[in-house]
Image (tube, rainbow, N blue to C red):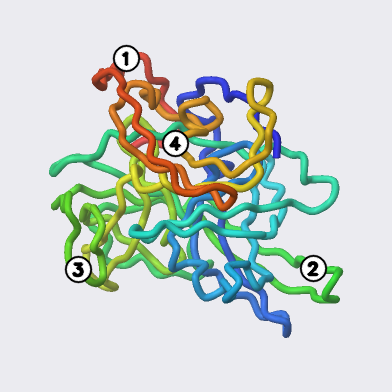
Amino acid sequence: MKLYRQRRQQGIADGITGIAPIYKVSLEGEVDLIGTGFWITEKGHLITAWHVIADNIGDDDVDRGPIYAIQTYADRTVVPSVSRKSCQHPLYDLALSETLGPGGHDADPTWTFSMTLTEPTVGDFVGTYSFLSFDQDFDGEKYEGISTDHFHGTLGIPDLGLTYELRFAARINRGEVLEVFPEGRDRVMMPFPCFRSDIPIYGANSGGPVFNRAGQVCGVNCTSYEGQDITFHMPLKGILELWARDIELIPEDPNPRNRSVIEMGLTDRICFYPRLSKFVIPFWVCSSACPMVALSHCMDTVEHNHQALERSRYQL
């Protein structure tokens, strides 16, 4: 898969084009909305929570399918992209899923948000833009959210002779960071770094992006306690060790091989702000074609320049 350098965008004009509802379809044509993801490349690479798609992974590490992520265009046209293979993080509840659109749409670029490794701190206001049930009840929200779009349509899978009804909604919710767990909250449920907020999270919000005030993705929705303002999110640094298959960096490295998110970020195939070259990060690049290789990059100290940021449509 050929990846070209992304232009240094600080946000996209219409936030819904950067997120995707994830759903499964049974062989009987029953649909289950299971989560949210967000695109990180222009070629359909999607970040979500691992538990969203875990039940769909076979013993051979291949998606059993059919599982889909919807790509939404600015005119509200929607196109289902099939999930072909997913990479699981060894610690975080995170996954990178490779998706492919149907013929005629497989070359359409997916839209991406600017992301940051700068983590939120206690007292910061953050928000999420995620998908949920068409008929979700919103009583008792501490900070009232905004439902931006509702979708209802009939789709089909010609190869399986299936048609099915799909309904979902998109909603913005916000809240305050209440606790940060840099070493993990516990040893079983969340043994990875995470932070807690009072953002109300609903079914299928898992895997959705968490935004800071500048409109940058700074985390990923993980889990919540229904009926309570207790929600946990993962910092974005967890995605760096995920990898995608057969990536060609055009024009400087056209050899297809497995590449990590950090490698694609350092070469501007994935958009971070500040650039990854502003961070000091020891990391591992995983490839099925070669042994695990230890890499370390020494970089400059992070310097914020929020005046240079353009506000995206998403505002907290």
Q: Which mark is residue 67?
A: none
The amino acid sitting under disc 1 is: Gln
Q: How crowded is mark 1: few (under 14 residues within 10 Å), some or many (20 or more)?
A: few
Residue 272 position in % (x across, y down)? 42, 29
For label 4, the SS is helix
| Residue drawn at point x = 52 percent, y = 25 percent | 268
Quadrant in which residue 316 is drawn: top left
- Tell which circle, 4 or 1, labels the residue nearer the N-terminal end: 4
- Residue assigned mark 4: 262
Q: Would you say the residues marked 4 and 1 are in contact, meaning their CB atoms lie under 8 Å apart?
A: no
Q: Give me the C-alpha separation between circle 4 and circle 2.
A: 36 Å
- Residue assigned mark 2: 156
For label 3, the SS is loop
Q: Residue 307 carries which label?
A: 1
Q: How crowded is mark 3: few (under 14 residues within 10 Å), some or many (20 or more)?
A: few
Q: Is residue 208 left or right of residue 100?
A: left
- Tell which circle, 4 or 2, labels the residue nearer the N-terminal end: 2
Residue 63 position in % (x across, y down)? 62, 68
- Residue assigned mark 3: 187
The amino acid sitting under disc 4 is: Ile
